[in-house]
Image (cartoon, rainbow, N blue to C red):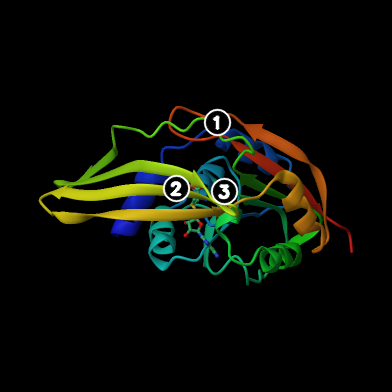
């Protein structure tokens, strides 16, 4: 498995607080399949497939897409290596989910909304998880998250969460120790500042109307989310 997939598992893989909501939305989405944007190594896509849903898992990163393809063998998951801001599907979907603040990573949200609108059936649902407006106090964890594989230890510690005028910046220190020693690196993620209202406004230009916002409560290890639920207008 690539280091990229291991870091992804370590930093995202254990999160499960949102899975109930994606399952609930998928249960109401007919016909199949469900489209997931930014599927990573498959935390959500594999869970939905395990609950009987056919999934198209779109992921831009080749290493993560390859790992997801390996994990999805035998399941109803089609892995599509593509950019969320410029993709086409060969069949229309009734539900598109965008978990874990992935929409806040995209560099061209207008292009993403246009692609998503093309991919969705009229009346289809687009659900996007974003950081809540009030992040509350962020406890910088003292103990790193650790994953060990074949004598190699991967350690990831969130070291800072700061707001700039346009983004929330999350910094994590990553270290590899054990039978393979790699000097520490700093991983920096910038999440564009969005609110449910600003996101719904952007989506309106591509033909989406707002159905409402759901809330996912924070956990000990993860911030909560607002999930903005939109409907693709009938043409
Ligand atoms: C926070 S992770 C979420 C992974 C997975 N959806 C989950 O909830 O566990 C964000 C994912 O989006 C992918 N991503 C970021 N920008 C993308 C883009 N423009 N197109 C497709 N995928 C993208 C990243 O490679 C990463 O796998």
Mark 3 or 2: the one toward you: 2
Q: Which residue is mark 1?
A: 136
State the quadrant of the N terminus: bottom left
Query: Is residue 72 visible to us here?
Result: no
Q: Is residue 120 above or below residue 194?
A: below
Residue 68 placement (x, y as % from top left): 43, 56
Which numbered marker is on residue 170?
2
User: Does residue 31 appear left or right of residue 42 in this picture?
Assistant: right
Label 3 within 8 A of ligand 1 by Cβ: yes
- Say which label, 3 or 2, has the lower sequence index: 3
Nearer-the-camera pick, 1 or 127:
127
Marks 2/1: CA–CA distance: 14 Å
Which residue is most to the left? 179
- Say which label, 1 or 3, has the lower sequence index: 3
Residue 77 placement (x, y as % from top left): 53, 56
Q: Which residue is mark 3?
A: 101
Residue 79 placement (x, y as % from top left): 51, 62
Q: Are marks 1 and 3 in contact (CB under 8 Å)?
A: no
């Amino acid at each position: 498995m690539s280091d990229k997939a291991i870091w992804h598992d370590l930093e995202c893989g254990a999160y499960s607080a949102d899975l109930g909501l994606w399952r609930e939305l998928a249960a109401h989405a007919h016909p199949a399949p469900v489209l997931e944007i930014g599927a990573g190594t498959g935390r959500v896509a594999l869970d939905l497939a395990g609950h009987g849903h056919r999934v198209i898992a779109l992921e831009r990163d080749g290493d993560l897409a390859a790992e997801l393809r390996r994990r999805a063998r035998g399941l109803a998951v089609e892995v599509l290596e593509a950019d969320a801001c410029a993709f086409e599907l060969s069949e229309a979907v009734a539900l598109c989910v965008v978990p874990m603040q992935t929409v806040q990573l995209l560099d061209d949200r207008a292009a993403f909304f246009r692609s998503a609108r093309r991919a969705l059936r009229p009346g289809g649902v687009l659900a996007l998880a974003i950081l809540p407006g009030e992040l509350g106090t962020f406890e910088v964890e003292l103990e790193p998250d650790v994953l060990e594989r074949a004598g190699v230890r991967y350690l990831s510690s969130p070291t800072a969460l700061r707001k700039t005028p346009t983004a929330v910046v999350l910094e994590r220190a990553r270290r590899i120790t054990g039978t393979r020693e790699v000097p520490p690196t700093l991983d920096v993620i910038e999440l564009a500042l969005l609110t449910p209202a600003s996101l719904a406004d952007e989506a309106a230009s591509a033909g989406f109307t707002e159905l409402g916002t759901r809330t996912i409560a924070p956990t000990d290890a993860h911030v909560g989310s607002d999930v903005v639920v939109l409907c693709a207008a009938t043409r």
